Image: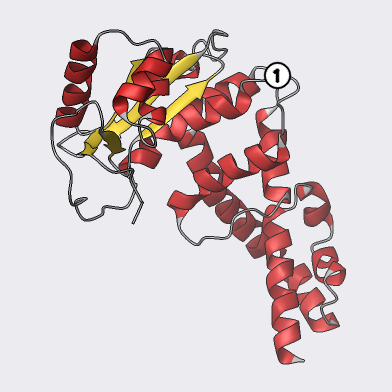
Amino acid sequence: MHESRTLRLQRAMGALVLDGDETAIEADPGRVARRHDLPGADQRAFRDQVLGMLTYRELARASLIEPLETMFPVLKALLDGTESWEPCVQAFLDARMVRSSQYRDIAAAFLGWLATSRWGLERWPFLLELAHAEILETLVARFPDSDPIEGLHPDPGPADFVVLDPATQVVTYTHAVHRACVEAPSPEPRPTHLLAFRDEAGLARLMELTAATAALLVRAQSQPLAEAAAALDIPDPAELTRLLQDLRREGAIAGFQATPPFTS
């Protein structure tokens, strides 16, 4: 019974923070306790401590919302234009998607919620892409470090496979979302291919790619370079070799190997 009451109390405190109707909570804070079947003493405590409860709500909500405003300023500017930012954030809070106790995980949880809920995509088809682009460099910068990959060589050959650095991402968007800014948050509708990686200093960088180069970096991870280049009609092997060597020196590519990655 004690554990059951504790869990109900936790849910009630969560609702106090996450529910959107602050006016109703302020008018009758005991309703939160009643909705979660807490005993009369707890209901009275919620009512008697209304100022403390509302202060706790304000501080706790700020700790959830401020990371979103910091990490998604362009998305916020876009949605503020139609007074949709606050409804979007409240829908996210209503979904109860935040599971981690780390502030740095809130933005990723928000991105995951946008992907699963598809909130706003009917009105703004680029919305999810814009949100992803805003935290892409952060995701790459925070990617866990790992031991160097063994058995790689620095120069690519026709039969070699490309091995990207584990933090590197090849991303394709339908809009030029990486060019959007707070002043102009609606991106141009054009296919965009990006390489996100960490350089030798550990700093996240973005590089815009051609469609052929992006496709090659994906194909050549599971197909020999010569075959991948031929399939994509890339005619100049010398130019391709120079590009891959440059990307390896920059840190985007870990190296090259004669067998497909992750095979025994």
86 shown above or below 67: above
* Relative image position of residue 121 (x, y in whole percent): 71, 26
Q: Residue at x 18, y 44 (%)?
A: 152
Asked whether 218 or 196 is in front, the reply is 218
243 shown above or below 114: above
Asked whether 181 or 159 is in front, the reply is 159
Residue identified by numbered label 1: 82
Q: Residues within 10 Å of mark 1 (few under 14, many from 20)?
A: few
Residue 121 visible to an observer of this rendering: yes
* Relative image position of residue 141 (x, y in whole percent): 31, 41
- Outermost residue on the bottom side: it is 1
Q: Could you tell me which secondary element the residue under label 1 belongs to?
A: loop
Image quadrant holding the C terminus, namely: bottom left
Determine whether, in the image, residue 189 is placed left or right of residue 32: left
Q: Quadrant of residue 228?
A: top left
Residue 203 visible to an observer of this rendering: no
